[in-house]
């Protein structure tokens, strides 16, 4: 079984890309570490009157290309290294899409499932009181991530505006639309992923109207199910899973009915006509396209040899381990790596920053069109790097991202 620290994996990926780009030692050192890290302990009043302490982080990995950008997680297992790794990947993700942004990530170690809405609000406001000097539309722009959402962003923006005494809607993104959010954010991650699948299928001669499967039926997974058919003109959703189990129906499931079923019953299990299969079997179904949209490290050296998908679109962050990557590449499976496949969300967040700056909001069609053009261009830039450097897709994407950040750092005279 592989075991590693996610930040060491991220550093290894940077060094591999740097070697192919012949970057000098000072540049490699700069890009292998966060530029700025902040750690603090938050004191939060709980509903029973006690004060509880929570460890929290905000890490700005690199801001050579613009203000740092990245989500905030509320999760019991966060450590400085998980946040460093996620902040590193945000840096390469914004650069691959060619957004004028850097990369960041934040986290609070807590268990939101055991906290009341009022406690979560107190925690969100305490976090902003701690990090407010280092954020802003021209510094670092947070967004939601695991167990944070538009409501969390609304509390955080309000706390920031209370401290500064001014309106600053662009200090955070993915806000509710009534207070500065954008059209098109809800399905942006999935839409971006499906656009890259469209480009991949057309380049490979793969048929997206054949079978596809989705691991994880949350925000990203549900939207991918709906958009796969809308954007690609067909496709049979034969397998799907969530934390409670996996189901299979070779004739295909109607994505809209499945979303309704999950909404009503809380799970994909029990969908009429579908049979329950083991969780592991979902990833090994005979499909044209597989969307991992749940967790990290689910495609490993143990199951990679059994994977039969022709295209894997990584909507989740880090679903494939380094050893599995090598196996998938050897098998000729076309992996669309997470820093490209799941970049639709941050792209539309960037559109939100622009709209907030001008207080002028775009029609949904304009958001979709601009997202499509950014993701399509990024997909082809990565393919060109893969061909030029003779590398696998993840390294190709890293080469594009790392080269752009290194160039910005050099122009600034940092290296
Ligand atoms: P979510 O919490 O809405 O959904 C996650 C889904 O995964 C849930 O349906 C859950 O039941 C399921 N799941 C959990 N454990 C599972 C397991 N063992 N097997 C199968 N399914 C399981 O989260 P989301 O926003 O859809 O994000 C999913 C992934 O996509 C995460 O890795 C996230 O970091 C990544 N991502 C999301 C966005 C976004 O905009 N939502 C952007 C970039 C990356």
Image (cartoon, helix red, strand yellow):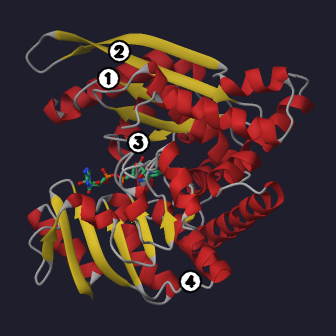
Q: Is residue 359 visible?
A: no
| Disc with the residue nearer the chain's start (3 vs 4) | 3
Q: Position of residue 409 (x, y in %)?
A: 83, 30
Answer whether labels 2 and 4 touch (C-beta < 8 Å).
Answer: no
Q: Residue at x 13, y 76 (%)?
A: 275
Q: Are marks 4 and 1 in contact (CB under 8 Å)?
A: no
The residue depicted at 68 percent of the width and 65 percent of the height is 379
Residue at mark 3: C-beta within 8 A of ligand 1 = yes
Q: Which one is nearer the viewer's eye here, 221 or 134?
A: 221
Residue underneath mark 4: 206
Q: Are marks 1 and 2 in contact (CB under 8 Å)?
A: yes
Instruction: Tell me how far mark 3 sits from mark 4, CA to CA.
Output: 32 Å
Query: Is disc 3 placed on a helix, strand or loop?
Result: loop
Circle 1 residues within 10 Å: few <14, some 14–19, many ≥20: some
- Image side of residue 175 versus residue 244, left or right: right
* Residue 280 x/y as whole percent: 26, 58
Q: Earlier in the sequence, mark 3 or mark 1?
A: 1
């Amino acid at each position: 079984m592989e075991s590693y620290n996610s930040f060491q994996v991220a550093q290894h990926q940077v060094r591999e890309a740097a070697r192919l780009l012949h970057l000098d030692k000072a540049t490699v050192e700069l890009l292998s570490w966060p530029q700025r890290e902040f750690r603090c302990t938050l004191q939060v009043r709980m509903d029973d009157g006690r004060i509880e302490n929570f460890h929290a982080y905000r890490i700005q990995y690199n801001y050579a290309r613009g203000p740092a950008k990245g989500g905030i997680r509320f999760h019991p297992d966060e450590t400085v290294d998980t946040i460093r790794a996620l902040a590193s990947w945000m840096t390469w993700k914004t650069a691959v899409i060619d957004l004028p942004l850097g990369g960041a990530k934040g986290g609070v170690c807590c268990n939101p499932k055991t906290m009341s809405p009022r406690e979560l609000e107190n925690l969100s406001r305490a976090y902003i009181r701690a990090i407010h000097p280092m954020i802003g539309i021209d510094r670092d722009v947070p967004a939601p991530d695991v167990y944070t959402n538009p409501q969390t962003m609304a509390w955080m923006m309000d706390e920031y505006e209370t401290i500064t005494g001014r309106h600053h809607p662009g200090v955070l993104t993915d806000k509710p639309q009534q207070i500065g959010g954008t059209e098109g954010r809800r399905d942006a991650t999935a839409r971006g992923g499906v656009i890259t699948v469209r480009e991949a299928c057309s380049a490979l001669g793969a048929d997206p109207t054949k079978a596809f499967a989705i691991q994880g039926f949350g925000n990203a997974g549900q939207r991918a199910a709906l958009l796969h058919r809308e954007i690609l003109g067909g496709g049979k959703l034969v397998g799907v899973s969530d934390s409670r189990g996996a189901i299979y129906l070779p004739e295909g499931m109607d994505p809209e009915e499945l979303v309704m079923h999950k909404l009503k019953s809380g799970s994909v299990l029990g969908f009429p006509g579908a049979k329950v299969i083991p969780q592991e079997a979902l990833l090994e179904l005979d499909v044209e396209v597989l969307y991992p949209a749940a967790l990290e490290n689910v495609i490993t050296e143990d199951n990679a040899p059994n994977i039969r998908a022709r295209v894997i679109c990584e909507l989740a962050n880090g679903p494939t381990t380094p050893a599995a990557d090598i196996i998938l590449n050897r098998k000729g499976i076309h992996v669309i790596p997470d820093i490209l496949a799941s970049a639709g969300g941050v792209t539309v967040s960037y559109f939100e920053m622009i709209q907030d700056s001008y207080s002028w909001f775009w029609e949904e069609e304009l958001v979709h069109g601009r997202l499509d053009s950014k993701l399509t261009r990024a997909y082809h830039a990565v393919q060109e790097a893969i061909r030029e450097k003779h590398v696998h897709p993840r390294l190709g994407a890293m080469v594009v991202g790392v080269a752009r950040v290194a160039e910005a750092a050099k122009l600034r005279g940092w290296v």
